[in-house]
Each structure stands twice: as C-alpha cells, then as structure tokens.
Image: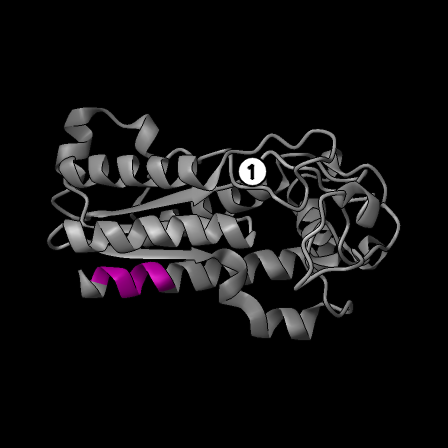
Amino acid sequence: MLLGEVTMTELEMALEKTKTLVIPFGTVEAHGSHLPLNTDALIIREVVKKAVDQGNVFMAPPLQYGVCTSTGAHPGTIGISPETLRAIVVDIVRSAYGSGFRNVCLISGHGGGLHLLAMREAGEGLAAELDGLNLAVLCVYDLIQEEIISLAETKNDSHAGEIETSIALYLAPNLVKGRAKEEYPVNTFPFITKDKLKRWPGAVWGNPAKADVDKGKKIFEVMVKKTVELIRRMEQQG
C-alpha cells in the first residue's frame, strides 16, 4: 500500500491490520556517464514497492536526497548534510509514530558511510524516546551480500558498476546510456582527500561492462525477497 495514495479514513482502517511503514531513502547523485542521477532512489523505490505489496504493509513516499561525500563534486550530485538527514529521519519517524505506526523500516538504496551513520544515529535516539517503536535501519545491499558474491563477476564492485547497472537495465533500460569504462577510485580508505574528482573522475566503482538484464533481474528479485523477509520479522516482533 502506498501511504501517499490513501485517504485518512482508509489509513485508520488499515492500521487495524498493520502498523508497519517502510520508508525508502535514495539520492540525487552522479552514477557515471551511463546511469541516471536518481539510480539509488529508482532501485530502492521499486524494491520496496514490490515488497510492501507482498507484505501488505505501507510504503512512504521515498526520500530523494541523501548524504553524498565521495561524489559531492561530481556534476549533478545534490546532497544534504548528515545533520539535515538526522533531523529529517527524526521528524518523519516521530510523525509516523504519532499517526499510529509502530514498526518502521528505514531502508536505503545508497550505501554511503556518513549517510547510513546519520540514519542510524537518528534511529538510536528514536528507539530510546518512543515506547513500543520497532525500528530497523539498513542499506538494501546489506541484505544480499552472499548473493552478490555468487551473481557478480566484478570483485569490489560498489558504485555505478556491474550490480547497479544490471539492476537499472532491468528496471529502466531507457535510462541507461551505454556503459561507462571500468574505474576504481585511488587513495581510498583510510585517506580523505579534498580533490575527489582527481582521484575518481568518472564516478564509477566497478565494471559496468559486466552488467546485463538477467543479472539485474536476479539481483532485484533477491532484494525484494530479503526485504519481504525483513518486513515479516518486524511484524512478528511488533
């Protein structure tokens, strides 16, 4: 069920059967020269939409903006600060709690370290503050690490590479503009550099040439399956 498309009366009736809300988090972020800026939001929106249909729970309208540090200087990236993301998470979850939701899943299609840390920090405070709140905070890729190892040919594939390009080919082939060249950023962890464009000009971390539609379909279906399983665990605990 899509939260934004029901009336208040329909919501009140539905809350008698489920108090679970899944909130997708994406970004507007450079994903190489071949993938759209909303790749993270596109993938997580479609995963959650299918998962909530199977779980008969609610999906909130996706949050389109996130914390983007590594790609902050690349063309098209429009990010928000960790402080802003924490504040948004707190406000949204508090309000959802006030509307009657008790199981809230914050699931991100973006795996940035500061992005997820901000979400988790906000979640820790909310869990301590709101009695009876059952809260999950995660990146969707955390759910499918084993499957990625078996499905992806590229080792250390991370951003706009084989995995994301494959899923985009399956979900929105018209938005995929060929393939960017294979690329891996230099001077990564633990080094922090100011000139990120110099060390990572193409905003690709992996090999898009290894991507294909069948692979994207398999990865997408595993994402949906694992998300449904997570929703069911939340419902059982709530």
Question: Is residue 167 among what the camera can see?
Answer: yes
- Amino acid type indicated by mark 1: Thr
Judged left or right of residue 208, residue 141 is: left
Q: Quadrant of residue 28?
A: top right
At x 81%, y 53%, the residue is: 208
Disc 1: which residue: 27
Instruction: Tell me if residue 108 is in the magenta stretch.
Output: no
Instruction: Tell me if residue 233 is in the magenta stretch.
Output: yes
Name the spot of residue 93 as percent of width and height, x first. Answer: 26, 41
The residue range painted magenta reads 230-235
Question: Is residue 54 among what the camera can see?
Answer: no
At x 72%, y 46%, the residue is: 169
| Rendered-image quadrant of the C terminus | bottom left
Judged left or right of residue 228, residue 141 is: right
Identify the main secondary structure in magenta. Answer: helix
Name the spot of residue 205 as percent of width and height, x first. Answer: 75, 55
Residue at disc 1, secondary structure: loop
Q: Please say if 230 is above or below 6.
A: below
At x 75%, y 45%, the residue is: 196
Q: In this view of the protein, which residue sits in the foreground, 38 or 73?
A: 73
Q: In this view of the protein, which residue sits in the foreground, 5 or 81?
A: 81
Question: Label 1 crowding class (10 Å Cα cut-off): few <14, some 14-19, many 20+?
Answer: many
